[in-house]
Amino acid sequence: MSIELVIDGKQKDLGDGFVVRRALPVVQKRMVGPFVFFDHMGPVDLKVDQGMDVRPHPHIGLSTLTYLFEGEVMHRDTLGFEQVIQPGAVNWMTAGRGIAHSERSASIRSTPRRLHGIQTWLALPTEHEEVAPSFHHHAEISIPEFSLQGARVRLIAGEVEGQRSPVEVYSPTTYFEVLLDKNSEFQFARAEHELAVYAVNGRAQVGGQVVSEGQLAVLKSGELLHLKATEPARFLVLGGEPLPEPRHIWWNFVSSRKERIEQAKRDWLQQSFGAIKGETEFIPLPST
């Protein structure tokens, strides 16, 4: 069996009844390569006057990567960036020493809409944990898309078969989307990377074990990924080289040092992360 662990994504309410499915972190598995956080948003049909409203909140020590299948999200941050992301594009924000941002439904709310996507966090290597914050938007057309072993692949971050994503990651990373037809098969190997696969929709056999929508299957170290679709399916392959030091995660803060997280708490309480144009709300520091 090539699978070390299968994680069932747990529902998490982000506020106002907007629920996501969270697959990382869990007690049994805190990281897969540099990935420390994995949220599956939707698919959800938003009614009139309903939307996703993630109020301004802070980050340190990580990069966030947002990737949509349907709908639109407006990103605003303390650097002054205001960017709508649409399906197939990538929003890549590096927090480094500190940034705050908001994420809200971008479309006009007078009509029903659909939202579906993924947000992940990637921990920064220790030598980059305090880099200056930055934000980059990569349009859909810039994301490499190609056929590999008969499957359609979109390379979100990292390198695969000589193709390279424009997303400038800070450590060796694998992150791509695979679209599979019924009864099709797909194989991928990268022995030096920790790897996991997530079923966005549909199901497939992973090393002979069925993995269904909402499940993250973590592979054993060095194992070949072998997907065999039992129906049309969309999977994400994610991972990378493991970081040598463990990471502490508290709320939206990630660091190799506990004292750095304590400093970030104080900075947020003192509103030292800066202001976001057009925003007056914020998420208070949790009590626990």
Image (cartoon, helix red, strand yellow):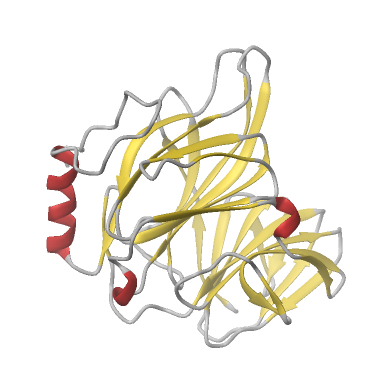
Above or below for 55 versus 264: above
Percent across and percent down for residue 256 are: 24, 69
Q: Is residue 219 visible?
A: no
The quadrant of the rendering that contains the N terminus is bottom right
The residue lying toward the viewer, choosing from 243 and 220, is 243
Percent across and percent down for residue 270 are: 13, 39
The quadrant of the rendering that contains the C terminus is top left
User: Is residue 288 toward the left or the right of residue 233 in the image?
Assistant: left
Q: Which residue is found at the position 47% from the left and 42% from the top?
A: 81
- Specify the quadrant of the image occupied by residue 116: top right
The residue lying toward the viewer, choosing from 283 and 276, is 276
Above or below for 91 versus 275: below
Q: Is residue 15 visible?
A: yes
Q: Which residue is found at the position 20% from the left and 38% from the top?
A: 285
Above or below for 171 versus 121: below
Percent across and percent down for residue 191 are: 57, 87
Q: Which residue is found at the position 63% from the left and 25% from the top?
A: 107
Percent across and percent down for residue 280 are: 32, 23
The residue lying toward the viewer, choosing from 214 and 178, is 178
Q: Which residue is found at the position 13% from the left and 54% from the top?
A: 263
User: Is residue 104 toward the left or the right of residue 85 in the image?
Assistant: left
Give the number of marks.
0
